[in-house]
Image (tube, rainbow, N blue to C red):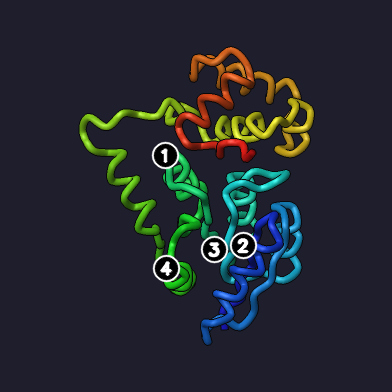
Amino acid sequence: MIHVLIVDSHELTRAGLRRILEDSPAIGRVTGVGSGEKALRSCRRHPPHIVVLDLCLPGLSVFEVTARLARIGPGAHVIVLAEHAKAPYPTRLLDAGARGYLTKNCPSEELLEAVHTVHGGRRFISTEAARQLALSILPGTADSPFDELSSRELEVMLKLTEGKRVPDIASLLCLSPKTVATYKYRIYDKLGTRNDVDLVRMAMRYGLVDLPRA
């Protein structure tokens, strides 16, 4: 029987995913936690077969959690569940060790298919993510400036757009504040931004950050 761990900061989302997953007779246990840190502790105590990981996590970034889960052991395969499939997230997360990438508007059948496919040792890319990946390599397709960022720079960028301060990011990512500051200004330089406000605006323009809700 498959053990699935859901990692999402929203309790209602975890409950909804749990109901979908528990409908499959092959899935025997579904648990949930609200952050990457809790996911790592849970995986060390009770290693799951599949980890369904939200793209936007409080605390540790999805990149860091994915990489650390891969180091804990080969048993827990990560499926990233995201609001969108915009580049460069799918490619970078698959490179970081994720075995699947789904968008949150996928049908429940696709989520179940992803869990069973990944548990069987294969990768699974949702229809929307596959379409975005295909479009990104077509001739004449406009490149995203965020493609120029390394995975670590993307991690720092995500935290900056959440309003995190350099010392907080340093603590979350186990880096020195000086290193994070270096990443911050390297990100500004690569993207042509001057400050965090410019950075957020650019991330929103490319669909990497949700528009603020009224």
173 displayed left or right of 193: right
Q: Nearer the viewer, mark 2 or mark 1?
A: 1
97 displayed left or right of 132: right
Which numbered marker is on residue 77?
A: 3
Say which residue appears at 64% left-offset and 67% top-offset: 5
Q: Nearer the viewer, mark 2 or mark 4?
A: 4
Residue 49 location in percent, x, y? 58, 71
Task: Give SS at disc 1.
Answer: loop
Badge 3 amino acid? His
Q: What residue sits right under mark 1 in the picture?
A: 87
Q: Nearer the viewer, mark 3 or mark 4?
A: 4
N-terminal of the pair, mark 4 or mark 1, is 1
Q: Nearer the viewer, mark 3 or mark 1?
A: 1
Task: Tell me if label 4 and label 1 are in contact, CB under 8 Å.
Answer: no
> What's the CA distance linking mark 3 and mark 4?
17 Å
Q: What residue sits right under mark 4 in the picture?
A: 110
Badge 2 amino acid? Gly
Badge 4 amino acid? Glu
N-terminal of the pair, mark 2 or mark 4, is 2
Task: Tell me if label 2 and label 1 are in contact, CB under 8 Å.
Answer: no
Say which residue appears at 61% left-offset and 35% top-offset: 158
Label 3 neighbour load within 10 Å: few <14, some 14-19, many 20+: many
> What's the CA distance linking mark 4 and mark 1?
21 Å
> What's the CA distance linking mark 2 and mark 4?
26 Å
**Pick the front one: 19 or 113:** 19
Which numbered marker is on residue 73?
A: 2
Residue 10 location in percent, x, y? 69, 57
N-terminal of the pair, mark 2 or mark 1, is 2
Residue 7 location in percent, x, y? 65, 59
